[in-house]
Amino acid sequence: MKRNIRLLIADVDGTLVTPEHILTEASVAAAHDLRVAGVALAIVSGRPPRGMRMLAAPLSLAAPMAGFNGGLLVNPDLSVIETHLLDGATAAQALQLLESQGLDAWLYTPQAWLIRDENAPHVAREAATVQFGPEVRPAFAPDDLTRAVKIVGVSDDLDKVAGCEAALRQRLAGAASAARSQPYYLDVTHPKANKGTVADTLAARLGLSAEEIATIGDMPSDVAMFRRSGLSIAMGNAADEVKAEASAVTDRNTEDGFAKAVRRFVLASAAA
């Protein structure tokens, strides 16, 4: 199908990088080919912006980066463009529900990552991924809740995480966005901090229509931006529910699915 693709918005973990969080040579080369073709590349992630800064130089990013699923929009030099904080009462409600279901809870402010147990599941892995460590608190203070840009529920009981996602969406409808950024991570953010709003914001900033935007991702949190773009691509490692929402499916992130998608779908559409 002929499309005039001018912007590709890419998820990071599970999409742009391998399961070991490595940016492959093929992905870097694909980003270069996008630039040559005049297609901008923007990245969006549940990660904090500090946890994406190592990608900016290899990819030669010029478009904004969206951290916390859109809770914090920054330039590639990390200067802030836009921030969406959770309401304090909403943050408290989210924490209460997560804890009542047995999930560990992390809290992110624009500047810091706060946890209560440094030995909890996935803490060490997350620190290695984002390349900075958390601050350990015995409890989250009221001031922390009013500065929360994202709260994460963490558990290796994946059914419980999915159940909490549904419960939070019902309880906090209109007050927060809840979506899994990984099967074991449930992200709670401001209603405007979702990847669909990121697509809308970037379209407005760059003067593009939805039909001129392509999106690529692997998780339920990526579906919102799929619905705001003319071309949506699901990774081969995505769940069937995510693939069903996309207009195309590429290979897995262990098989350079991002790079293949750029050439098979994005650049082919841009050339057409």
Image (spheres, rainbow, N blue to C red):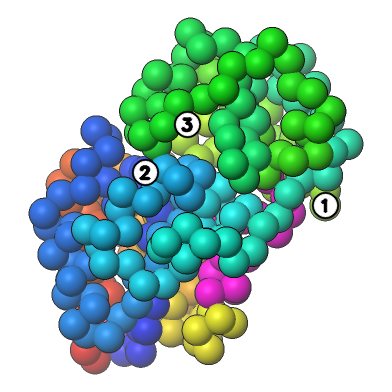
Per the image, the residue denoted by label 3 is 183
Residue that appears at 54% across and 18% down: 155
Kindly report the distance in space between the C-alpha atoms of the residues bearing marks 1 and 2: 27 Å
Would you say residue 123 sits in the magenta stretch?
Answer: no
Q: Are marks 2 and 3 in contact (CB under 8 Å)?
A: no
Regarding mark 3 in the picture, which secondary structure is present there?
Answer: loop
Q: Which of the two discs, 1 and 3, labels the residue nearer the N terminus?
A: 1
Residue 201 part of the magenta segment: yes
Q: In the structure shown, which secondary structural element does the residue marked by tag 1 occupy?
A: loop
Residue 106's disc is none
The image position of residue 253, as x and y in percent, is: 24, 46
Residue span colored magenta:
189-202
* Crowd tier of the residue under label 1, counting other residues whose Cα lies within 10 Å: few below 14, some 14–19, many 20 or above: few
* Circle nearer the N terminus (1, 2): 2
Up the image or down, 50 lies above or below 121; here it is below
Q: Is residue 82 visible?
A: yes
Q: Where residue 233 sits: x, y (%)?
A: 36, 62
Q: Which residue is mark 1?
A: 174
Q: Amino acid at mark 2?
A: Asp
Q: Residue 134: x, y in percent?
A: 52, 25
Circle 2 sits on which residue?
13
| Residue 162, visible in the rendered structure | no
Closer to us: 183 or 76? 76
Q: Quadrant of the C terminus?
A: bottom left
Q: Sequence order check: which comes first, mark 2 or mark 3?
A: 2
